[in-house]
Amino acid sequence: MRRVWWVLLALAAALVTVPGVASGVASAERSAERPAFQLPFPCGSVWQLNTWGHDPALDMVVDGNTGSDGLPVLASAAGTVSATYRDNGSGNTIQINHGGGWFTAYYHLKDAPDAYVKKGDRVAVGAAIGRIGTSGASNWAHLHYEQRYLAKGDFTDERHRVPSLLDGVRYSGPNASWTGVVSRNCAGAPPAWQDCPSGYVCFYDGPDGTGSVCRSDSDQPVSSCGFRRSYFNNGSPQPGYDHVQVSFQGGGGLCLHRGWTEGRGSLPDGGKVVEGFVWRGEC
């Protein structure tokens, strides 16, 4: 009789949902409202992910772990920026609320957390929110990325993180690693803009970063670019020189500041003949 009693108690305990992290993860995993999260990097780029020491969070670097510093970080789903702050551990940090209790967090960003977006900004999937860096308790360039679930509230912490699904694939497990992961975050800026190499200014035949490209990482006081309709400044040939002063045939010019917001766009009046350009600290 006593044995039956203990069996019944064990069964009852198994049916009880204990509030806390474990139950939060379970409810998140069952949620039908989970956004279609994508890798937080430009379309077609290839990455290496790992959970070393912090499953279910992910550390992300360029596949082969070279050249990650300064590369753009994109929103992995549409949402509203719910927090931008600096922390001794996570460094320059951004959180995005994607609705339905779903959040993402981005650690160790290179620039000030509100350099690209500010709290309350609405962002589309693929929108640039920062760059990979080493801020906080990090001595190597990487993005620490987390998906989180919190049914009520607008500020999450690491207690709310859950295993990540990216492009429908689950990445979780202690000390796990994945290589050759291709970003399908293709709904943001046109691929031509995203393909402008770091360190260059690029000019395009078509509007909004489309068409063939001419590009340079050095001064061209006399340029062979010719008639162009759009531009993207993704460069900084030396510290402090992140502006490009462009002159147009027939007069006039434009100052292009590096960055995904200030440094890209279509040229005025539907297009201009680019006569030359010079890298500067300010212009």
Image: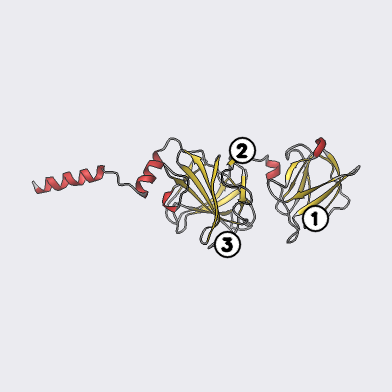
Q: Is residue 196 left or right of residue 54?
A: right
Crowding at mark 3 (Cα within 10 Å: few <14, some 14-19, many 20+):
some
Crowding at mark 1 (Cα within 10 Å: few <14, some 14-19, many 20+):
many
- Judging depth in this view, the residue of 75 and 97 nearest the camera is 97
Kindly identify the amino acid type of the residue bearing the numbered disc 2: Ala
Q: For residue 140, which numbered disc appears in the image?
A: 3
- Image coordinates for residue 106, horizontal then vertical, percent: 54, 51
| For discs 1 and 2, the disc positioned in front in the rendered view | 1
Q: Is residue 178 above or below residue 89?
A: above
Q: Earlier in the sequence, mark 3 or mark 1?
A: 3
Residue 8 location, quadrant: top left
Q: For the point 74% across and 38% down, which residue is it?
A: 210
- Image coordinates for residue 221, horizontal then vertical, percent: 87, 53
Q: For the point 79% across and 52% down, which residue is it?
A: 244
- Image coordinates for residue 119, horizontal then vertical, percent: 57, 47
Label 1, secondary structure: give it.
strand
Q: For residue 219, which numbered disc appears in the image?
A: none
How much space separates mark 1 and mark 2, taking CA atoms? 31 Å
Residue bearing mark 1: 279
Kindly identify the amino acid type of the residue bearing the numbered disc 3: Trp
Crowding at mark 2 (Cα within 10 Å: few <14, some 14-19, many 20+):
some
Residue with the most extreme right position: 250
Residue bearing mark 2: 187
